[in-house]
Amino acid sequence: MSGRLRILLADSNTPDRELAATLLRGALPEYEIEAVGDPMALAERLLHPDLAAVVTEHALAWGSGLELTATINRLHPHCPVVLFTGVHSEEVAADAIRHGVDGYVVKGSAGYLALSAAVKEALARAERRRASSAGGEYYRTLIEEMPVGIFTLSPDGTIREASPAAASLLGVADRGALAGLSLPALLTPDSHERLRRLLAAGAAVRGIEAEVARAGAERLWVRINAWPVADVGRPVARWEGSLEDISGYKKAERQLEERAAQLSRSNAELQQFSYVISHDLQEPLHLITRYAQLLGEKYSGRIEAEAHRWLAHVLTSAARMQAMINDVLEYARVETRGQPFLFVDFAAVFADAVDNLKVSIDESGAVVTAGDLPRIPADAGQMAQVFQNLIGNAVKFRGSKAPRVQTSAVEAEDAWVFAVMDNGIGIPAEHLDRIFGMFQRLHGSSEYPGTGIGLAICKRIIERHGGQIWATSQPGEGSTFYFSIPKKSSAASEPGVSMENGGEHGRQAAARSAG
Ligand code: ADP
């Protein structure tokens, strides 16, 4: 066995057969050419599976070449047949074509020359047929097996054909039973009406989410795509489309919405709680302060020095508690007292913050400067507070060097990123995140005064603007505090617009620019 594919040549005329075989061997060396002249040999060869093509005389000694063609079509559906015949008649040629013959060559000197080309052409055509039928089969299998449902509808939305997945998504066990039903009518009333209107409009339906009613079974969410297919004179001859199960996605979406609602409820409660608590704590605290003062004044000559010291402790602690309460109130007010976002000149905001910090800046001899700062929508009062807290900290947490504080801003793709850089004591890397939490301090209040809420307020303000805040530091060298303010999507010309988030990009851009 050579392992090569075979071309069978059937002709009862020996010289013709031998000449044709010689020509074919020369032209198609990659094939085994088997020439047979009797029915027994032919019958035996026909059973072999590796048959690439058959060349046969029309008038065989034992029968007709067309009968042989019919047998071959039955046994080897993809095998092409070329009729090589001495009979030159249009009738025979037409009959041959009806029988599915792939080539018709008339014997004679021109015919012998044309035979090899005709066989090659028949082989190529058969190959194309095989490929396209394999492709068709492939797509059929894909449609049958795919979890996405495929359907064809009449122009009015009646189902003509549906894949098994479409039937199961629509809750109909037998897909034959789907034909003739209206697709919109299988949906819940809301979805039904929507799809009906879209189909009536005649434009492609792109990914609408619809709920399938599914009698007796659990309701199911599907995404529907459908596109009109036009025909001569008809813009919508039929619809073709797909159905995808998106129940899992819808469930996750619902859970997310519930969690967001829950979160915003508990946020509001927390807000209310911190507001009420801090508000209500003020009154007893006032009383403590007042009575401690009275005690000190009224009994000043009659109590021991130690008791005076204790009273002084009571008063300092009460003052510290008052400061903390004020800060908690301030924190709670970031949301409740926030103003709409109008165009803010950050250079002016910076100047205000520096003005408010004048005393500590002058006392410390700090040099506080700013680069070009933009004019962008924000809550001006809150931005002044952020600058004040950051610059105030930069001055407060100074080291032995004369404090230098540099404020700057860079424009990233979708956000402005501000930086406040100092040459102070710095922050160990492990505390860089923690310091933005409430009451998180790295030092005692006798060392550096403060309540530990300034950065938490900054964070809340920046988050209200859709941005992020973070810090980098080199202990002993200084720290840089960054915050991003996302740009709003359209041209920033209208005042009073709140912005979508975009802080992460700003953060990456700043990390790049900070090198
Ligand atoms: P406070 O300034 O009242 O302590 P903050 O919330 O403003 O509270 O800051 C929290 C802590 O972060 C500070 O106590 C300090 O330890 C650290 N910190 C903040 N800013 C700086 C800075 N510029 N340099 C060094 N440490 C800082």
Image (cartoon, rainbow, N blue to C red):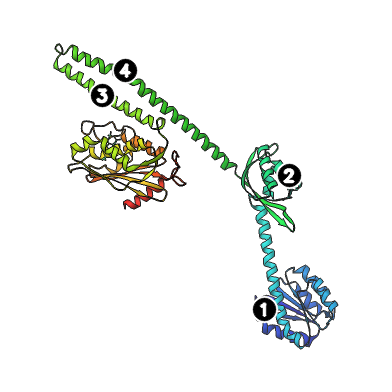
Q: Which mark is residue 431?
A: none
The kind of secondary structure element at disc 1 is loop
Q: Residue at x 66, y 41 (%)?
A: 194
Left or right relative to 164: residue 101? right
Earlier-in-chain disc, 4 versus 2: 2
Location of residue 99 in the rendering, given as x and y in whole percent from the top left corner: 81, 71
The residues tagged by marks 1 and 3 sit, at their Cα atoms, a distance apart of 104 Å
Earlier-in-chain disc, 2 versus 3: 2
Within 10 Å of the Cα at label 4, are there few (<14), some (14-19), or many (20+) other Cα atoms? few
193 or 249: which is nearer to us? 193
Residue type marked 4: Pro
Q: Ligand 1 is located in which of the four quadrants?
A: top left
Within 10 Å of the Cα at label 2, are there few (<14), some (14-19), or many (20+) other Cα atoms? some
Quarter occupied by the N terminus:
bottom right
Residue type marked 2: Ser
Location of residue 353 in the rendering, given as x and y in whole percent from the top left corner: 29, 37
Residue type marked 1: Tyr
The kind of secondary structure element at disc 2 is loop
Please state which of the two labelled residues, at mark 1 or mark 3, is closer to the viewer: 3
The residues tagged by marks 2 and 1 sit, at their Cα atoms, a distance apart of 56 Å
Name the residue carrying label 3.
Answer: 319
Instruction: Name the image quarter holding residue 62.
Output: bottom right
Please state which of the two labelled residues, at mark 2 or mark 3, is closer to the viewer: 3
Name the residue carrying label 2.
Answer: 182
Location of residue 324 in the rendering, given as x and y in whole percent from the top left corner: 30, 27
Name the residue carrying label 4.
Answer: 284
Q: Which mark is residue 31?
A: 1
Earlier-in-chain disc, 3 versus 4: 4
The kind of secondary structure element at disc 4 is helix
- Whether residue 18 appears in this view of the structure is no
